[in-house]
Amino acid sequence: MPPERPTPDDPREWLARAQSNLIQAKTLQSGVYLEDLCFQAQQAAVKSLKALLLAHESSFPYTHDLARLPGLIEEDIEEIPEQIREAVRSTDYAVEARYPGVSEPVEQEEYEEAIKLAESVVRWVEGKLAGEPETPSGDR
């Protein structure tokens, strides 16, 4: 029997989904495109930021666009660290990188950067929701 999940309006459920996306993003397997793993990393960042907005009772759009979420956080909650703002670069993985011929294939270094950015966002939001001091680099 699967564990009971929080309700969809609970930030913990959004953060759990983000953590799931991050696990998937870090699961390199033969036959899996790096573009698809980068999409999972991008989704981890998106869902983490939405968890933070939800925790502060702020509304957010149902979009893959990471560029809008930091602005909403800064408008409704607090200023975000530059390292977290850098995750906006992974917005391209939400659409363009998932379709053949729309963008160049993702290289290993680019994939590793996408993972690093997603981990930073997830860890930062985990800390915020747990009330921990700011540590965007994930060094805890």
Image: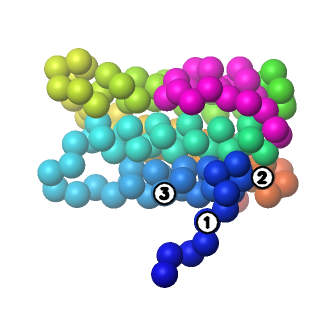
Residue 120 painted magenta: no
Say if mark 3 contacts mark 1, CB within 8 Å.
Answer: no
Task: Judge from the rendering whether residue 2 lies leftward or rightward of residue 97; answer left or right.
Answer: right
Residue at image coords 21%, 49%:
32
Within 10 Å of the Cα at label 3, are there few (<14), some (14-19), or many (20+) other Cα atoms?
some
Label located before the other in sequence (2 or 3):
3
Q: Which residue is mark 3?
A: 20
Q: Disc 1 to disc 2, how far (Cα)?
A: 17 Å
Q: Which residues are magenta?
A: 56-73
Give the main secondary structure of the magenta stretch: loop
In the image, is residue 19 above or below residue 137? below
Give the labeled residue for mark 1.
5
Q: Secondary structure at mark 1?
A: loop
CA–CA distance between discs 3 and 1? 13 Å
Q: Which mark is residue 14?
A: none
Query: Looking at the picture, how far across and down is residue 107, in whole percent?
Result: 26, 34
Q: Is residue 126 above or below residue 84?
A: below
Amino acid at the residue labelled 1: Arg
Can the viewer see residue 27? yes
* Callout 2 crowding tier (Cα within 10 Å): few <14, some 14–19, many ≥20: some
Q: Is residue 114 left or right of residue 57?
A: left
- Disc 2 versus disc 3: distance between alpha carbons? 17 Å
* Residue 129, numbered label: 2
**Where 106 sits versus 52, above or below?**
above
Q: 57 left or right of 136?
A: right
- At 46% across and 25% down in the image, what residue appears? 91
Q: Amino acid at mark 3?
A: Ser
- Can you tell which quarter of the image residue 30 is in? bottom left
Residue drawn 32% across the image and 22% down it: 96
Q: Give whichever of 140, 13 is nearer the camera.
A: 13
Tag 2 or tag 1, which sits nearer the N-term?
1
Q: What sort of colour scheme is used for the picture?
A: rainbow
